[in-house]
Structures are given as C-alpha cells and as structure tokens.
Image (tube, rainbow, N blue to C red):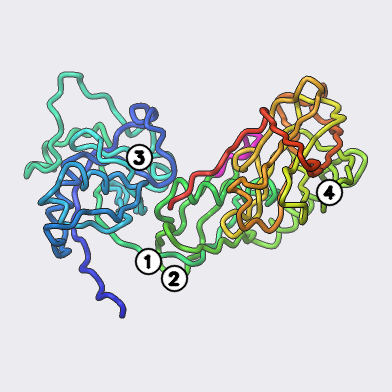
Amino acid sequence: MDEPPQPELEWSAPFAVLPSSKSASRDLRGDKILLPQSALEQLLAASPRPPAPSHSSFTSYDPFNPYARHQQTQYQPSDTSQQLPNPLMFRLVNQKNGNAVYAGIREFSAEEGEIALGPYLMEALGILPTEFGSRSANAEPIDLASDMLPDSLPETQPRVTVHAKQLPKGIYVRLRPLEAGYDPDNWKSLLERQLRESYTTLTKDTVLAVRGVKGEHFKFLVDKFLPEGDGICVVDTDLEVDIEALNEEQARETLRQIMAKAQPGTANGSSRGGELDIWKPVAGQVLPGEYVDYELPSWDRTRPLTITLSEMSSPDAVDLLISPKSTRQRAKPRDSEHVFGSFTPAEDGTNSITIQPTNVELENAEMLLISVYGHPLTASLDGTAPLSFRLSAKAALEGVSQVNANARLVISRRRP
C-alpha cells in the first residue's frame, strides 16, 4: 500500500552570496551549497512532517547530505523527530535579475547571513565577479532576517532568496553539446561520474561543464526532462542521459572532426582493441591521451589471473586499467574511474595486475573490461607518435600464487 504524500516543506530566506575567492577552499562542485547553522534550525522548525516515536532513532539518511548527520548528533532526542525531506533540495532566485536554479545541500557551515555557491550555480544565477564589492573589515555582520532588510543591506554582495523545494525523481535528461567535435569516448564516463558525485538536482537551460582527461572542458546545455518540468532530482534514480546535437550542422561538423582524427587501426592511430583471448597476446599501440579498450569474456575463475603490458616503447607513459563489468559497473575503465590500475612499471619494464579468484570485485562479473591508456604528460618526444605495447592475459598454474605490488585499487564513490 502506497504511503500518503507528505506535506510540502515551506521555508525561504534571503542570503548574501559569498565571493568565490572566499569559498574556493571548500571545493564546491556541481549544485552543492553551504548554508548557515541557523538555516537548519529554521528548516527543522518549519517541517510539517509528523514526529517519530520517542523511542526511535533517525537512521535513514543520505550520508552525502550532512544535514541528516546534524539531526542525529545535535538535535536528539527532541529535534530529530522533525524529519526533513531526503535529499533536501532548494530553489535559488537571484534578487537582482530573477534567474533561478535548483540546488542540493552540502553542509550547514556557512557564516550567518551568507550562502556559498560553486561555479555552476554562479553561472546559472548570472552572478559576475564584478558584482562583489569590498566591505570594511570592521563592518557590522549582516542580519538578513532583519525587518530593515531593504535599507540595511550594503550593495557589496549579490543576494539570493533560498526556497525549500522538492523535485520529482528524473528518469530522462537530454543534453546538447555547445560545441562541435565532442567525441563520446572522451567524456561519457566522466559525465556519468560527475552527475553521480556532484549533483542532487538538474535545472533546465543550465550548462554542465565536464573536465576531460587532457584538461579540456566539455559543455552541455540541459535541454529536456522526464517527468517534464524545469528541474529534477538525480539522486537514487535510474536516469537515462541522451546526447543530441544542437542542429544538423553541428552534427555534421562533429562527425567530420572525429573522422579527421587518426583513425583506430591505422599506422598513425591507436589500435582498435576488441576481444582478448586467454593465453593469446595481442600487439597494439595507443596515442597519448587516448584509450584502447579490450574485453576478456572468459577465463578460469578458480585461478589467479594476471594481465600484463610488456614490450612498451615508453613504459612510463602507458597505464593499465581494469574494471569488472557487472550490474553495478558498466563504464569502460578510465584514468578517473576504474577498479584496478597499474601505473608504475616494474624493473623489467612490464606493467601487470594479478587478480585473485576470491576478490570481491569479481562477484557477478560478466567479463573484464581492460583499457590501455597513453598518458599525455609523459608521452613520446613529439607527443603525437603512438606508443606500442603487448597485452596478454594468463591464469596462474596450479599451486602457484602470484602477487602484484604495483596494482592499485580505485573504486568510484557511490551512494549506498
């Protein structure tokens, strides 16, 4: 039986925006904001949700939303009964130009009367660095709750009004690249990771910026949602992401630029990759800053498995990355997201990873995704010549135990 819908949390308050120079150390990414401690107290007081039984404790919370931890530690036993929506979301409105954007909370640790925003929210609200003036160090603190607000606020900080707002769980979003030439292999896994780690909400007509492995930035216009509306929640939902060109001209130009690159399988391009066979080595090459992707569909899962890179033309410039493909891990291994990685060649000039059959990461694995990455910072002299390698996979002989000290485990951060 479905639970009856909870009443909407109604709360709003004005805040002065903290300059980026003062909030840079907090490394605010995506749509995350910082609010003062008093905002949490006001939200708890405004919550319309019924109190929990006095003998219960608040245990269901999102560990990425610290307000939940605050409830547990600072407001027990009486205040934790006033439960807040999870995740907690807000609608921010620029008082100067009327621009609006949705946001999620990171911490309640800002100074009283102030709100800290990251670059994404600053751009969406149309707040420019030139709008921040300089206040005297001896100036009185800003009381944004004062009845004299219109006359008492100095014109040195942009001001936004923050409204508590719950959004529906998104099931579909369409993004449009702002420039031609974006190759999905360069940004798709990075985009998925960024949405998972740095966003609670998405707002229509805002611009997402994704940083590539070479330091480049890919920008996408948030164009359409399902369910329809001007915003969605992207936490704890299966979100389908569709990338569509702005127009036919951009689509044609993107295709032309991709085709103009050194094509996989040519003398000057990276190898095509493909299926890897146990005991059957393959020779290949990779351009600096690119990946060659292989799949290992089957091996003896009762024995340790060793994946080895050898005969490399520049051992310090080629990395070995592996991720088991399963229901919870579908993306190809990348420098920013993988499960196993070997980055430092051994004395004999090889890079290898040995995975024991009991490793928990192999549980329910359909196959192994293996990527060879040509590192752009330590590549060959001219930075454009392909780096050659030999890739092999073999199972250990019975009675032989292998351990690889160079393998490093890197697991992407996920919400439980």
Tell me if mark 4 has few (under 14), some (14-19) or many (20+) residues whose alpha carbon lies within 10 angstroms of its own.
some
User: Of the residues tagged 4 and 3, which is closer to the observer?
Assistant: 4
Residue 268 drawn above or below residue 249: above
Residue located at (81% from left, 37% from top) = 286
Residue located at (66% from left, 36% from top) = 341
Give the residue type at disc 3: Leu
CB-based contact (under 8 Å), mark 1 and mark 2: yes
Secondary element under disc 3, as helix, strand or loop, is loop
> Could you say which disc has been placed on residue 117 in the image?
3
Give the residue type at disc 1: Pro
For the record, the magenta segment spans 210-216
**Percent coordinates x, y for residue 75 in the rendering:** 15, 46
Task: Tell me how far mark 1 sits from mark 2, CA to CA.
Answer: 7 Å
- When asked about the image quadrant of residue 113, the answer is top left
CB-based contact (under 8 Å), mark 4 and mark 3: no
- When asked about the image quadrant of residue 46, the answer is bottom left
- Read off the residue under disc 1: 168
Residue located at (86% from left, 41% from top) = 269
- The one nearer the camera, 188 or 125, is 188
Instruction: Considering the whole magenta stretch, tell me its main secondary structure.
Output: loop
